[in-house]
Structure formats: C-alpha cells, structure tokens
Amino acid sequence: MDKKFFIGIAAMAALTLVSCSSDDLDSLSDNSSKNEAISFDGYLGRSAVAVNGSRGGVETANTLQTNGFGVFSKYDGTASFPDFANQKVTYSNKKWTYSPLKFWPTEGQIKFYAYAPYKEDQKLKENTTTFDFTVADNAAGQEDLLWANATGQIKTTSSSTKEKVKIHFYHALSRLGYSVKLSGNYSSNNVTFILKNITLAGSTDGNTPAFYKTGTIDLAKTNNETGVWSNYTGGKLKFNWYSGEYNIPEPEAGKEPSPSHPDKDNNGTIEKDKDYLFVIPQNFSEKIGETENPDKLYVIVEYTIDYGGGVKVDNKVYKQITQEFKQGKAYMLNLTLGLPIEFDVDLTEGVGVEGWGTDENINIGSNDENPWDRK
C-alpha cells in the first residue's frame, strides 16, 4: 500500500523586538572645569529574551550585568582625549563601572560604540567603526551579539546635573528556534513518531552550506539601518541542528496537537532550549527584485514511524524556506510531521455506494425463439 507523509513548515517571527533609534545623549555638568568622569548606563530593550526568560546563548539583561560589555570611542574635538579602546564595563553595586576612569573634555563630542559579550582581544578595523564576526558551526558554540552607539559631550551653557552615557543595546543577529508536533487531532493508537535529525542546508541532500559564516558589523549604524552587516567572507555554513531520538508526543484524542521540543539530547547533556541558532541576517527569498536568489535554504527532517511488532518505517522529508532573516528578529520553525491515511465514504444514496442501475431483462421460455429445453 502506498503511504504518503508530509511535513508542514512555517518560519515566522516569534516576537518583534523593540525598535528604537540610538538617540544622541549628553552627559551634562554645571561646570565643565570640574572634568566630570564619563560614566555609562547600559540598557537592553524589552525583547523575546525579557518576555520568555533566559535561554542558552542569548544575551539578556542578566548576562549583560554578569559579563559586562566593551566600549570603543571616537573623539571629534581639538583637545587631547585618549579614546576608549575595547574598555570593559562591568556592573557592580547597582552601577556600571570601569577602570581607569576617563574624563569629559571641555569641548567637542565623543561617539561611543559598544558591543557584548565582551572579548578581551576585540579590535576595530583600522580607521573604522567595524569588526568581523564569525558564526560558530554548531548551536552549542554560538553566541548572541549585541551592539549600540551613542554620542555625548559637555554642555557649558547647561545648569543641569550630568547624565550618564545611555547605551541601548540591540540584537545584531537573527535567532532561529524550532518546535515539532504531529498533524491532526487524532490518537495514533500506539504508533510512535521518533525524530532523528534536523538539518538546515542549501540543498535537499543536506550537503550544501547555506548561511554566511563571517560578516562585518558596523557599530556606528543604528538599529535596522541598511549596512549594519557587509563583507560576507569565509564561505558558508550548514547546521546539523538536531541529532538523536525524540519520541514526539501524540495529541490527546479530540484535541489539537501542541508543539514540543526535545527536553534533552545527547544522553542528557544538552537541555531544552539550549540550541537556538544565531545567524548573520540573510535573505532566502525566492527572488531579489526580478532576479532569482542564489542563496537557498532547506530544512531536512529525518524521522521513524514505529508501528510496533518490529515494523518501522524511516522517512526523510524536506522543504525550502523562502524567508528573509532580519537583524534583531526571532524566528520559530514549526515542524509538523505525519499525515494519517484516512477514509471517507459519502453515504448519500447513489453517491458513496454506486447504485445498480436499471435491470437488464433476460427472457426465458417467453416465446418460440427462446423455448424451454426438454430432455
């Protein structure tokens, strides 16, 4: 018997992040000759992280406080000022601190460029506000990337008290998650679906890389501005996102199935929600303008249907994803497996069961042309 199965894919934004521009922020002093120390105030806007709690690899307000962030600066005045060069800023006693302190110059502006998580060896490219970022080739090794910029200066005409340089961070990457469920509100009567592998690649066989490996981020750009990312180098990546054996929960009889996620993998060493993918923003739409897009992305899923009694059927299905993954957005790939073979008979008279039609007469012994035979 021919058995048909299908997979439904939906790649959708899980939550729209707060989208605010990085406003110019002044640190004010009632007397510029006091040489007020430059201080910072870090802020991570309300996002998918803040709503859903801390998850693996994601930079949150908590991880920002724990690990700190790095700051570069560019001074545009004529006085002397030693710019910040990957200065680490940490959170202690309810305030952001760094050492050694730097002080406001009496004139001119300072442009601040921040990022997180902090890297001791991070440097900007010469005479730029950019650095290269490389995506790890597996989910366990990946990191979220935050960036921010602000401008500050002393205003000698102001009588207001000074303000801290307010650093408002944004997510620089796209975040991908997944869920899996069975189709239909039916009970499978002890048939078990076992998820084996999920692969994201640039071809249906899973062998072609798809995602940018390295890109250049410009810390001077504002959120959602064109040109935040450029200069994609280092080839591309594919991801074997899941590998293991996960029994997908079957729906309760009469209820719609709920999406789930493997609680643990690799003999319990990777916990739930520790396998988000963080990727450089990339457009996988079918066309860019009138031109076919050379960048392709497929999700390939392998699973086994166990009918019991030693009868198992292995399946491998795929679907192309034609989604533009944007900077600072979270996406959930909702995978639906299993199309049950169902039957339907229309009980309308003469429709679902074919009628006999009009009887065809067979006349026997009715005339001399067809008499009864005699022994």
Image (tube, rainbow, N blue to C red):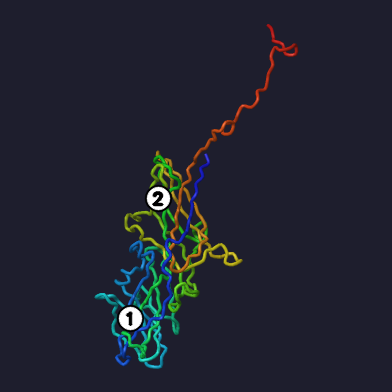
* Secondary structure of residue under mark 1: loop
Q: Nearer the viewer, mark 1 or mark 2?
A: 1
Decide which of 73, 158 is in the foreground and name it: 158
**Residue at 32% in and 71% down:** 64
**Residue at 31% in and 89% down:** 30
Few, some or many residues within 10 Å of mark 2 (<14, 14–19, 20+): some
Q: Which residue in the rendered view is the most extreme toward the left?
A: 93
- Mark 1 belongs to which amino acid? Lys
Above or below, 83 against 239 in this view is below
Nearer the N terminus, badge 1 or badge 2?
1
Tell me: 370 left or right of 17: right
Decide which of 368, 19 is in the foreground and name it: 19
- Mark 2 belongs to which amino acid? Ser
Verify CB contact (< 8 Å) between mark 1 and mark 2: no
Above or below, 122 against 103 in this view is above
Residue 44, position as x, y percentages in the image: 36, 71
* Secondary structure of residue under mark 2: loop
- Residue 164, label in figure: 1
Residue 50, position as x, y percentages in the image: 35, 65
- Residue 354, label in figure: none
Q: How far separated are the C-alphas under marks 1 and 2?
A: 47 Å
Residue beneath label 2, please? Answer: 258
Dividing the picture into quadrants, the one containing residue 168 is bottom left
Above or below, 348 against 221 in this view is above
Decide which of 144, 330 is in the foreground and name it: 330
Residue 375, position as x, y percentages in the image: 68, 6
Tell me: 338 left or right of 31: right
Dividing the picture into quadrants, the one containing residue 127 is bottom left
Residue 298, position as x, y percentages in the image: 50, 58
